[in-house]
Amino acid sequence: MRRRSRREARVTAYKLCSLALQYPDEELLAARGELAAAAAALPHSPAADAIQRFMAWWVPASGLEVAEHYVETFDLKRRCGLYLTFYGLGDRRERGQALLRLRRLYRAAGLPQEGSELPDYLPLMLEFCAHAPDRRGEQLLREQRPALELLRAALHEEGTPYAHPVEAVAQLLGAPASVDRARAARLAAQGPPGEMVGLEPFAPPEVMPGEAMR
């Protein structure tokens, strides 16, 4: 029973982080009270504390304030992007293969992607973490740990409340391995690779917006 409770708490935490990092449309804003109650019911942990700190700002803030802050944070600051493979692969064609692999893994786990977002969109990966069997979602997310660490650092440096749900994800995954910290440092120093020369899109049609997998 205790193991099940811990598993359910992790599922809830991943779902809350996924929702917290999505654009705050009217439907999401209307659910803030319910989501805050779910966060308050989580067992005490560093991840739960981080989620509750986010809720303390997110719930009482006006919808306009939240929406403007979201756009300012994630849409106008490249280093705070939520598309994780971009940090290491930039716009190179290799990124298209990485995105295609993610989409195929979602399908193989019985959770085919719906919607138009690219499959490396962090809220989408967190939703996969919440539902994938055998913690396969966490395995995928750990592959992107250097990018996640860069995002976490950037959000903390910006002083944005959106640092808290990303901090919660990091706590759920555990401390990064030394190789991930080293790679994150290299990525921070080098920046994402530049766009490849050529007319082909960086991602194949299977993973581009508007071609969601069914």
Image: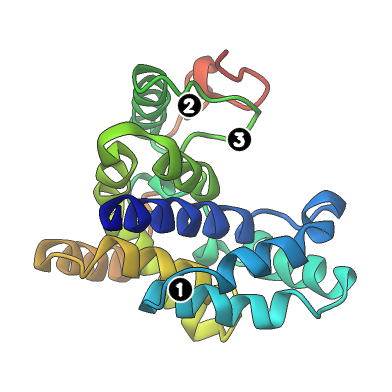
Residue 114 appears at what percent x and percent y?
Answer: 60, 24
Element type at mark 2: loop
Residue at the (43%, 37%) spot, across then down: 131
Q: Which residue is mark 2?
A: 203
Q: Looking at the picture, does residue 12 appear above or below residue 95? A: below
Quarter of the image with the C terminus in it: top right
| Amino acid type of the residue that numbered disc 1 sits on in the rendered structure | Ala
Image location (x, y in percent) of residue 106: 40, 26
Q: Is residue 180 left or right of residue 157?
A: left
The reply to whether residue 195 is visible in this rendering is no
Q: Is residue 6 left or right of residue 68?
A: left
In percent of the image, x 72 and y 61: which residue is there? 34
Mark carried by residue 117? 3
Residues packed near mark 3 inside 10 Å, few (<14), some (14 to 19) or many (20 plus) = some
Circle 1 — which element?
Answer: helix
Q: Residue at x 67, y 62 (%)?
A: 35
In this orientation, which residue lies closer to the viewer: 144 or 105?
105
Query: Would residue 41 appear left or right of 4 to someone viewing this image?
Result: right
**On residue 48, which mark appears?**
1
Of residues 6 and 192, the one drawn nearer to the viewer in this rendering: 6
In the image, taking residue 130 as reference, residue 175 lies left or right, namely left
Amino acid type at mark 3 = Glu
Q: Earlier in the sequence, mark 3 or mark 1?
A: 1
74 w.r.t. 112: above or below = below
Q: Secondary structure at mark 3?
A: loop
Residue found 52% across the figure and 44% down from its top: 121
